[in-house]
Structures are given as C-alpha cells and as structure tokens.
Image: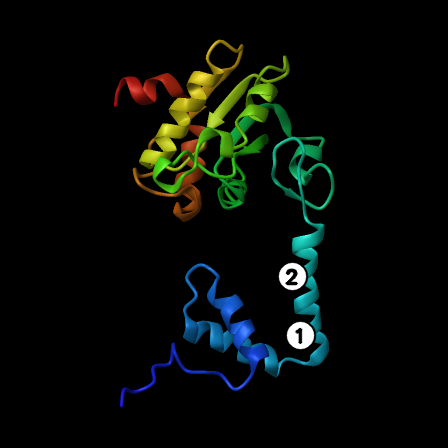
C-alpha cells in the first residue's frame, strides 16, 4: 500500500481545504505553507479574521487604477499624479507597481510614472496590445511632457519593450532616456538595492546610446 503524501492528504474540512487551495494558488506558496497560513487564521480572534477577509474583499471590489498612469489608487487619480510638487513633465515608465515602489524608495525621482502592467513577451503570450502603450503615446504628445525614462527590467523582454516604445515615441517632441547600467543585466528593478537604483536614475542616459553601443 502506497504511503499517503501530504499533498494528496484529504483534509477533515471542506472549508479548510478551499482556504488552503486559495493560499496555494499564490506565487511561491506550496501546500505546506498554505496549510500553515490557513491554520494561523483559525487561531486569530474572530474579529481579526473577519477583518482580514474584509480587506481582501475590498481590495478586489473597491481598488481603482489611476486613469492617468495606471498606478493602483483609492481614487480616480493616484497619490503621485495628484501631488502638486511632482514634476509632471517627466514620466518614468515601469513594468508594474513593484518597480514603482522600488524607485520611490530611493527618494531620487520627483516626476510621475506610467505603469505598463507587464512587458512584451511572445513566449508568455503578452503582446503590445496587452500593455498600456497607447495611453503612454497619448501622454507623450502633450506639450508639457519633456522627458520619458525607460525603467524596465534589464532582460530580453524588457529590452524588447523599450525598443518597441522607442519606435512608437520617435518623432514626438520628448527626450527619451533609460537607466544607466548600474542595474545589472538580467535583474528586475524590485531586487536592485536602493543606492544602485537611485544612482541609475540620476545617471540616466539618452536611450539611443543604450542600443547603439550594445
């Protein structure tokens, strides 16, 4: 008789099983960790557990995306775009919220952002039409926009996306720059230390030089 593995073990409660399955569906969470999370919830005070569930419900049903830059927001416009002291003439293009937060943590950038919500990746079925590219080109056409910074991952997908955006923005009266190569090739911005990332923003280069010398 084969031994029952933890992964195939039937749990004594359907509700517990469903909760474990939901946790297990999260990135990087295996069944044992999912079980630990679910059992931890059972140990919480009822009000604390209910508050936890309510926060997830509200996250899904009430969270907005900024109509200007596509950042996560509680209102129609995010806090960055609404801030009166941010430099609205400089747009930093990032893959997602994690990269935006990484750049904000450096305290070296005072402009605004544009969240693409991904990078071009044919292998994963992600095309330019799946990203917030059109809204970026519309923003770039505004007279007030002076510079657009490409702050995408130093990966094949990130470089492909940068080149595509560069072609889309060519001809518009805007300076196009990219992070200096203080960010190692193959790295995601979210894993780059704050000092290196901050220096890469300050020392940004004209985008043309990044592929002419490659």
Q: Which mark is residue 49?
A: 1
Contact (Cβ within 8 Å) of mark 1 with mark 2? no
* Residue at the spot of label 2: 56
Position of 24 relative to 72 (above/below): below
Percent from the top left, x then y, of residue 9? 41, 82
Residue at 26 percent across and 19 percent down: it is 213
Residue at 52 percent across and 27 percent down: it is 133
Mark toward the start of the polypeptide (1 vs 2): 1
Q: Does residue 79 appear left or right of residue 39 in this picture?
A: right
How busy is the neighbourhood of tag 1: few (under 14 within 10 Å), some, or many (20 plus)?
A: some
Percent from the top left, x then y, of residue 15? 59, 78
Circle 1 SS class? helix
Residue extending farthest to the front is 1
Q: State the residue in front, 128 or 99.
A: 128
Position of 82 relative to 149 (above/below): below
Residue extending farthest to the bottom is 1
Circle 2 SS class? helix
Q: Is residue 6 visible?
A: yes
Q: Is residue 182 visible?
A: no
């Amino acid at each position: 008789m084969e031994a029952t593995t933890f992964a195939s073990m039937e749990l004594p409660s359907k509700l517990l099983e469903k909760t474990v399955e939901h946790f297990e569906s999260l990135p990087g969470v295996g069944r044992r960790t999912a079980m630990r999370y679910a059992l931890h919830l059972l140990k919480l005070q009822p009000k604390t557990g209910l508050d936890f569930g309510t926060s997830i419900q509200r996250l899904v049903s009430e969270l907005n995306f900024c109509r200007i830059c596509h950042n996560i927001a509680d209102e129609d416009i995010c806090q960055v775009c609404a801030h009166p002291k941010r430099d609205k003439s400089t747009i930093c293009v990032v893959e997602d919220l994690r990269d935006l937060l990484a750049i904000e943590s450096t305290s070296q950038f005072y402009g605004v952002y544009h969240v693409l919500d991904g990078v071009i990746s044919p292998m994963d079925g992600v095309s330019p039409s799946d990203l917030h590219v059109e809204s970026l080109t519309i923003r770039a056409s505004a007279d007030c926009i002076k510079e657009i910074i490409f702050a995408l991952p130093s990966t094949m997908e990130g470089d492909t996306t940068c080149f595509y955006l560069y072609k889309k923005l060519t001809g518009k009266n805007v300076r196009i720059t990219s992070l200096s190569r203080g960010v190692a090739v193959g790295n995601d911005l979210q894993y780059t230390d704050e000092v290196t990332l901050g220096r890469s923003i300050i020392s940004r280069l004209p985008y043309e030089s990044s592929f002419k010398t490659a």
